[in-house]
Image (cartoon, rainbow, N blue to C red):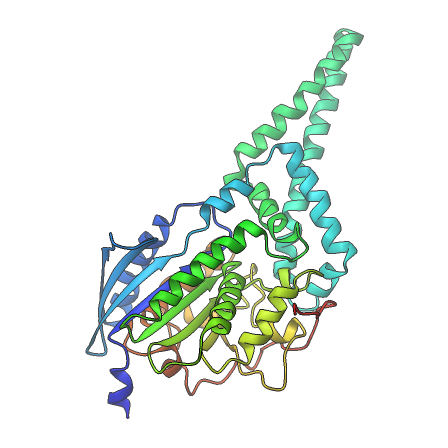
Amino acid sequence: MATKVAKSVQKRRVFYIPGYDPFPPRRYRELYREESRKQAAISGYEIALTSDKGSANYGWIIDSRIDGQAVSTQMEVLVWTDLVRTSMVQSIPATYAQLVRTAWIYIATGTLWRLTWLRKGPVIAALYPIVMLLVQLLTAVGLTYGAARLLGALHPMAAWLGLVVIPFVLVGFRKKDNIFFAYYLMHDYAYSARLQGATPPDLQDRMDQFRDQIAQAMQSDVDEVLVIGHSSGAHLAISLLADLLRDRPGPTAKPALALLTLGHVVPMISFLPRADQLRRDLRYLGQSEDLTWVDVSAPGDGCAFALCDPVAVSGVATDNQKWPLVLSAAFTKTLQPKTWKSLRWRFFRLHFQYLCAFDRPRWYDYFQITAGPLTLQDRYATRRPSKSTINRPASKYTSVAA
């Protein structure tokens, strides 16, 4: 039996859906190249990358030999970077208007309070850009006041010249957003909240394209089609796979279909009043017999709703719920103390740890999942959910689309 399972995958297609990320997809290939090399050295297997010039998206070919089994994987990034960049083209006043509008949506609907029932970390992360932008504004006002007082001492009319300090200070802060991340995070949360959880039309069009590409892969001669959704890419993966399975005429023996969600932030959207479509998709996928769904997170990741069952906490679980299998990457156990110490306060870096090498990988190895000889189903067939899984309903809104 073990030999049969070990030979279950020889060819695989992987589709990776990033979160709200304005950077080009090339960085995911280079991250995979660097980190797979590290993991291979730690775990004792062979893995190599080559470019995939025939890919419709940005992709690469992975050739590996793990547990004595050769596997070929075609991995593609499903790109929505252009939509992210467009949404980030906002003036400074428009960003502050986003701040007010987004804060009002989460507070007035009661969503922010409900989210605190789950994990404090991602709620703090959501409040961070609001606080930081207000601090920047108050700093600009304070410096303007000081400049006005100083100039006013020279001449009463000169005090008005101090007002020019405000735009200079705010522009300066924005230029340093690669340090503060305030504008980036504000645009991220505003993008999800602006329609109170409904999917923006341009994003829905892109997801329909993604679904069609995955559907084509399901007709190929591979052994497994694996879809990976990271961060806010997790809820995109959930919805497009739910649509794909609803459109399929019925289950097929080959290829196996699998979904891996990493560091999800699903409640940030599914708890909003107009997220009916996402809640419908969560309920549908949670009881589907046509795929394997594994969700991996870690309490050490302060940007994710760690170990929160996205179906259950959204209030749409049924008696037939089967997925996801919620597992913990347990950073404090899978990273050496020295590594954990160096990463502990690097919140954004930790949010990407799921895509990186682990010192002591135990049961979770991103590169064996994406390039190894086992399907996701076989790899976790005997695995039990984390004992720390949070599955109590917390959303105020539980309606689903018809």
Number of on-image labels: 0
Residue 224 point in image, percent of width and height: 33, 74
What residue is drawn where x is 51% and y is 63%? Answer: 234
Between 68 and 357, the residue placed more toward the observer is 68
Residue at the top extreme of this rendering: 155
Residue 319 point in image, percent of width and height: 63, 86
327 to 14, vertically: above or below: below
Please say whether residue 353 is visible from this viewpoint: no
What residue is drawn where x is 57% and y is 75%? Answer: 284
Residue 166 occupies which quadrant of the picture?
top right
What residue is drawn where x is 27% and y is 66%? Answer: 73
What residue is drawn where x is 69% and y is 75%? Answer: 393
Residue 337 relative to residue 316: left or right: left
Residue at the bottom extreme of this rendering: 1
Quadrant in the picture for the C terminus: bottom right
Please say whether residue 391 is visible from this viewpoint: yes
Residue 394 occupies which quadrant of the picture?
bottom right
Residue 311 relative to residue 70: left or right: right
Residue 372 point in image, percent of width and height: 29, 73
Residue 179 relative to residue 54: left or right: right
Residue 214 point in image, percent of width and height: 39, 65
397 to 126, vertically: above or below: below
Quadrant in the picture for the N terminus: bottom left
Residue 50 occupies which quadrant of the picture?
bottom left
